[in-house]
């Protein structure tokens, strides 16, 4: 069964500093990987996704993530955070079957990002 | 604008009562999903449906029921058998199919918060 681990429950970063959120996955084949962001009391918004090809993917709001197969990781990065980046971040892995169907995504438990002024 | 609408946003229930959460999408997506979110637990899959009149149990289906009579609608009933129903519930949808049409990405509604009194 696939699983996702986000080792950091909370991370505090100063505004303007760089950010890296960690994500490790467990899956037998090449996974479909996602990062989502959630503001309090809201739904989830997709930041970026990886299926194949270039292992460095760019997303919205200046975020990027790098897929490292050897480390089973898909860490999210941003060179300079803004106060508006404070939110909950979720890493997720998915399975695509040969017939094109899927049974949803498996999510990590999330990392709560706090921005210090 | 296309999207997913969940209602109500807030719901209070007495113990022993069944409640139904609504989820409607106008994205013309084939697949729909229900997730439950608890603090520090991430998102856990309750039920999903890849096609009208068909649905499958997710990881935590006990105490819940669903129907999929129309492509755009996927209501979730939280029954009195659910021992700890207080949570934030998220509905999502995705494209199904082979080739480039399928991305695995889930599109989320704004969520419904259920509180049992």
Image (cartoon, coloured by chain):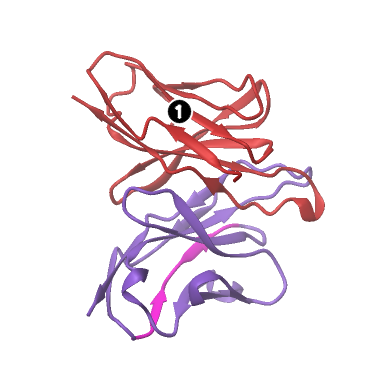
In magenta segment, residue A22: yes
Secondary structure beneath dot 1 equals loop
Q: Picture coordinates of residue B102 (x, y %)?
A: 73, 51
Q: Nearer the viewer, residue A58 or A21?
A: A58
Q: Picture coordinates of residue A107 (x, y %)?
A: 46, 52
- Graded by Cα atoms within 10 Å as few (under 14), some (14 to 19) or many (20 or more), the crowding at tag 1 reads some
- Rendered residue at 72%/46% (across/down): A97
Q: Is residue A4 left or right of residue B117?
A: right
In the picture shown, does residue A100 fall above or below A69? above
Q: Which chain carries label 1?
A: B
Q: In this view, does A33 lie to the left or right of A9?
A: right
Q: Picture coordinates of residue B78 (x, y %)?
A: 38, 22
- Rendered residue at 41%/78% (across/down): A20
Q: Picture coordinates of residue A86 (x, y %)?
A: 32, 67
Which quarter of the figure has residue A29? Answer: bottom right
In the picture shown, does residue B42 fall above or below B36? below
Q: In this view, does A99 lie to the left or right of A80?
A: right
Q: The red chain is which one?
A: B
Magenta-tinted stretch? A17-27
Dot 1 corresponds to which residue? Answer: B61
- Rendered residue at 50%/36% (across/down): B5
- Rendered residue at 58%/61% (across/down): A33
In magenta segment, residue A89: no
Q: Which chain is purple?
A: A
Residue at the front extreme, as displayed: B1
Q: In this view, does B97 lie to the left or right of B22?
A: right
Query: Which quadrant of the figure contains the C terminus of chain A?
Result: bottom left
In the picture shown, does residue A96 fall above or below B28? below
Residue at the left extreme, as displayed: B117
Number of dots carrying numbers? 1
């Amino acid at each position: 069964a696939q699983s996702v681990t986000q080792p950091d429950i909370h991370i505090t970063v100063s505004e303007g500093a760089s950010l890296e959120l960690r994500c490790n996955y467990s899956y037998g084949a090449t996974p479909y990987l996602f990062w989502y962001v959630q503001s309090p009391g809201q739904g989830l918004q997709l930041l970026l996704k990886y299926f194949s090809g270039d292992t460095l993917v760019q997303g919205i709001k200046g975020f990027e993530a790098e897929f490292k197969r050897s480390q089973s990781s898909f860490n999210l990065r941003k060179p300079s955070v803004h106060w508006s980046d404070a939110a909950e971040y979720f890493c997720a892995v998915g399975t695509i079957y040969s017939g094109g169907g899927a049974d949803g995504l498996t999510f990590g438990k999330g990392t709560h990002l706090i921005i210090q002024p | 604008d296309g999207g997913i609408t969940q209602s109500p946003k807030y719901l209070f229930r007495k113990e022993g009562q069944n409640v139904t959460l609504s989820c409607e999408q106008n994205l013309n997506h084939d697949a729909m999903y229900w997730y439950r979110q608890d603090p520090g637990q991430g998102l856990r899959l309750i039920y999903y449906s890849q096609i009208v009149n068909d649905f499958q149990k997710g990881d935590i289906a006990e105490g819940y029921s669903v129907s999929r009579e129309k492509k755009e609608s996927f209501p979730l009933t939280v029954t009195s058998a659910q021992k700890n129903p207080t949570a934030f519930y998220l509905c999502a949808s995705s494209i199904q199919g082979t080739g480039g049409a399928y991305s695995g990405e889930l599109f989320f509604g704004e969520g419904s918060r259920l509180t049992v009194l």
